[in-house]
Amino acid sequence: KAFWAFWFEHNKEWILAELLRAKAARGSVAQGSSGWYFSGATAGRSLTPVTDEQKTELILPVLQEATTHPSSWVRDAAVLAMGKLGGEAVIPHLLARIRQDPDAQVKEDALLALGLTGVQKTAFLELMKVLQKKPVDGNQKAYAALGLALLGNPAAVSPLMKEYKAAVKSR
């Protein structure tokens, strides 16, 4: 049961997309030019892109509240959504989950979400701190490395290679 929940959590987007494609083929859902799917009254109309102001004022408060939900599943989904939302405004909330959340998976996905934000300077520095932290928490270090890879910052290559060589050498 736990394996299924883990697998679904990390694969649900493509599953849901396939379900929507099937509905679109039957004509009950319309697909926009951006690849998003719309149903009901929104079918056939395009959506206006969400502005940074709307993200900060409307979406972020909802996600911030979700990061304190009693369920770790909800908190985990919220930190990943924050990462996808991106921008400097989500960084303090992600750092709070990394430092304070009682669930290891939420902390790890918050590290991954830092990389998803695309905020080069702040996210890069925070992920590097975790990568170089002593004592070593292997899972957090691995998620920090993935976050750094998502940022795509060339300055991460050398530290990541150093960590990789140290890990190989210690085996």
Image: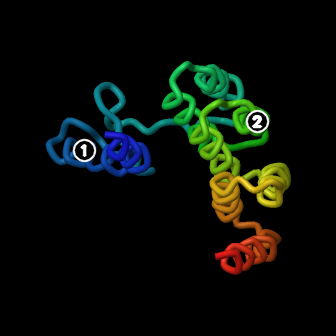
Is 67 on the left-hand or right-hand side of 74?
A: right
User: Of 65 and 27, which appears nearest the observer?
Assistant: 65
- Position of the C terminus by quadrant: bottom right
Taking the view exactly as shown, the residue that stands out farthest to the left is 26
Kind of element beneath mark 1: helix
Which kind of residue does numbered mark 1 sit on? Leu
Mark toward the start of the polypeptide (2 vs 1): 1
**Considering only vertical position in the picture, is 96 above or below 20?**
above
Quadrant hosting residue 61: top right
Name which residue type carries label 2. Answer: Arg
Which quadrant holds the N terminus? top left
Which residue is found at the position 70% from the left and 80% from the top?
169
For this view, does 77 lie left or right of residue 45?
Answer: right
Residue 70: x, y in percent? 55, 19
In the rendered view, tell whether residue 144 sits above or below residue 20. below
Binning the other alpha carbons within 10 Å of mark 2 as few (below 14), some (14 to 19) or many (20 upward) gives: few
Q: CA distance from mark 2 to mark 1?
A: 37 Å
Identify which residue is drawn at 67% across, 31% down. 101
Q: Position of residue 64 (x, y in %)?
A: 66, 25
Instruction: Answer few, some or many: residues within 10 Å of disc 1's Cα (few below 14, many 20 plus, some between 14 and 19).
Output: few
Q: Are marks 2 and 1 in contact (CB under 8 Å)?
A: no
Q: Is residue 148 above or below residue 94?
A: below
Residue at 82%, 60% in the rendered image: 132
Instruction: State which quadrant residue 95 falls in.
Output: top right
Determine whether the residue tagged by mark 2 lies in a helix, strand or loop: helix
Q: Does residue 32 show up?
A: no
Task: Read off the residue under disc 2.
Answer: 99
- The foreground one among 25 and 171 is 171
Q: Is residue 137 left or right of residue 134?
A: left
Q: Nearer the viewer, mark 2 or mark 1?
A: 2
Q: Residue at x 77, y 59 (%)?
A: 131
The residue labelled by disc 1 is: 19
